[in-house]
Image (cartoon, rainbow, N blue to C red):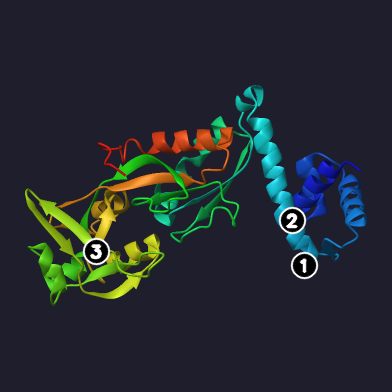
Amino acid sequence: MDRFDAMQAFARVVETGSFTKAAQSLHLSRTTVTQLVQQLEARLRVRLLNRTTRQVNLSADGAAYYERVVRLLADIDDAETSLSGAAATPRGRLRVDVPAPLARLILVPALPSFHARYPEIQLHLGVSDRNVDLIDERVDAVIRGGEITTPSLVARRIGDLQAGLYAAPAYLAQAGTPVDPYDLESSPHHIVGYLRARTATVLPYALRRDDQQRDVHGRYLLAVDDGNAYLAAGVSGLGVLWLPDYMAAAHVANGALVRVLPDWQVAPMPLYVAFPPNRHVSAKLRVFIDWVAALLEPVAPVQTLRPR
């Protein structure tokens, strides 16, 4: 038994949920895949998979083993693709976590061009605004807005999101149009609060006009920790939003949102790709980062770098 082939067959069965689908993806017969998994179980002296006529599920031992197998296969793949000859055609699985609005509005619609250029990269895209433990969750990189404050991560700046304050016409009809940022801190105005992932506190708004600066905390009835829910709350008239312009554009065009306090500037939000310093920057990760940076250039060009 070739242990590498057996581990690869086992991992593919888990990921496809079927011996038949695993065999097809590996260009092997179903019998061969079945034998490889059986031989692996015999060698380990544990049952890795619970099989029925309709489905295949991991056993408790199988789940623990799968976690290690995936890491090992990824390390082998990275080692191979780091060689000069293999680096010309990046391949393998790449796990990246990105904010939900960025995925929905920018990254996912453009992925056909990425896969046309790099057809051998299998992308696992986690879509969330939560904090991700890159090591424990085996994530290669995250894309996040705001300064990266985790000292254990290496970050590359890939864009600066231009932003402004927006509100729904229904909200403005009820509460009136704010004329000063501090209006958002008194009745009848409200903001929609956006929660920091780690501290569950609401982010303040930092606004500037000429030599004036306002740090606005705002009154809120609702605070959320997800970008899509935040946008939906604002469109529904629940308060004033701080939004990157790319998120607001379509809703401004169809009349669902209106720019407010347009003479006050919101500091651009830096956008970073971050990854562990001890993680080898594989060819597949490198080309993905370069592709995302080029994709963001028209909508979020990097401004003059601020000291970090």
Instruction: Determine the secondary structure under disc 2.
Output: helix
Looking at the image, residue 297 sits to the left or right of residue 274; the answer is left
> For residue 204, which numbered disc appears in the image?
3
Identify which residue is drawn at 55% across, 37% down.
281
The answer to which quarter of the image holds residue 302 is: top left
Q: Mark 1 or mark 3, which is nearer the start of the sequence?
A: 1
Residue type of the residue flagged with mark 3: Pro
> For residue 66, which numbered disc appears in the image?
2
Which is nearer the eye, 75 or 226? 75
Instruction: Determine the secondary structure under disc 1.
Output: helix
Looking at the image, residue 139 sits to the left or right of residue 207; the answer is right
Identify which residue is drawn at 90% across, 45% down.
32
Residue type of the residue flagged with mark 2: Tyr
The answer to which quarter of the image holds residue 224 is: bottom left
Which is nearer the eye, 173 or 133? 133
Instruction: Identify the residue position indicated by label 1 in the image.
Output: 60
